[in-house]
Image: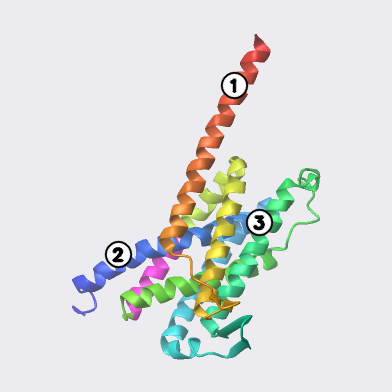
Amino acid sequence: MAEVFSIENLLTLAMLVMLQAVLGFDNLLYIALESKRVAPAEQARVRRIGIIVALVLRIVLLFAIIQAIEYFQLPFFEMKFVGYVTASFNVHAFVVLVGGIFIIYTAMKEIFHLLSQEHLEDAGDTSKLRSVAVAITWIVIMNVVFSFDSILSAMALTKVFWVMATAIVISGILMLMLADHVAEFLKKNRMYEVLGLFILFIVGIMLVSEGGHLAHLTFFGYPVEAMSKTTFYFVLGILVVSDIVQSGYQKRLDKERKRGLLD
């Protein structure tokens, strides 16, 4: 028992909780955006059920990966068009790559929808809302995609199952606590919804590059390189800062216009 609650395990647990919290940001953002597609009265319930089901599946996935890590890394499909495209896909690479492509598609579709005239006309139209079951299903599926990186990162720090499982549970509880706040913030500050979609778009690019790298994907002899986490967070920081500056400048212009009209 003393070994289980050793200083090393407790310090590793603290590191993993912080890691899960950082890696869980993009997942939380997707959950907030996805829950908007159901009726307003059901949105909070969709977020709660989606996170709880996804949390249980993440524990199951953790156990499965630990038991069959080598099988997740074995190639099951290869492409060899020498001089054009080559790749060797395993389960890990395939899930990350497909998940990234889907996130890019979702983000771009929502961005174009925001820019369209139909977005304003359909604002009160409930006929185009998704069902609760469909929204929860997509939240769970995308959580599995995000889980691969967080679980493999956890396995790089420790081999103790309870430490990894506890970190996942704590991060899930934090997501439950924060999900409504993130969704409410986006609802009250619609201008940041566009920022969130572009962040999601960059997340998709990062996953596609990582999946391509894991699959040893090459185009015309040039290998696909994974976007580093440092680059991702640097771009994320630039996006947030530029959006804050733009918002402040826009507010200042609005005040100047109102002052000009009053004068």
Residue drawn 45% across and 65% down?
Answer: 172
Which is nearer the N-term, disc 1 or disc 2? 2
Could you tell me which quadrant the C terminus lies in? top right
Which residue carries the number 2 mark?
14
- Report helix, strand or loop for mark 2: helix
Q: Residue 44: where, in percent of width, then height?
A: 59, 55
- Report helix, strand or loop for mark 3: helix
Residues at marks 3 and 1, CA–CA distance in whole angstroms:
38 Å
In the rendered structure, which amino acid carries the disc numbered 3?
Glu
Residue 220 lies, with reference to residue 171, above or below; the image says below
Which is nearer the N-term, disc 2 or disc 3? 2
Asked whether the residues under the numbered discs 2 and 3 touch, taking CB atoms below 8 Å apart as contact, a structural biologist would say: no
Q: Nearer the viewer, mark 2 or mark 3?
A: 2
- Report helix, strand or loop for mark 1: helix
Q: Is residue 99 in the magenta section?
A: no
Q: Which residues are magenta?
A: 161-175
**Furthest-top residue in view?**
263
Asked whether the residues under the numbered discs 3 and 1 touch, taking CB atoms below 8 Å apart as contact, a structural biologist would say: no
Left or right: where 150 falls relative to 220: left
Seen from the viewer's position, the closer of residues 20 and 43 is 20
Seen from the viewer's position, the closer of residues 180 and 197 is 197
Disc ID at residue 255: 1
In the rendered structure, which amino acid carries the disc numbered 1?
Lys
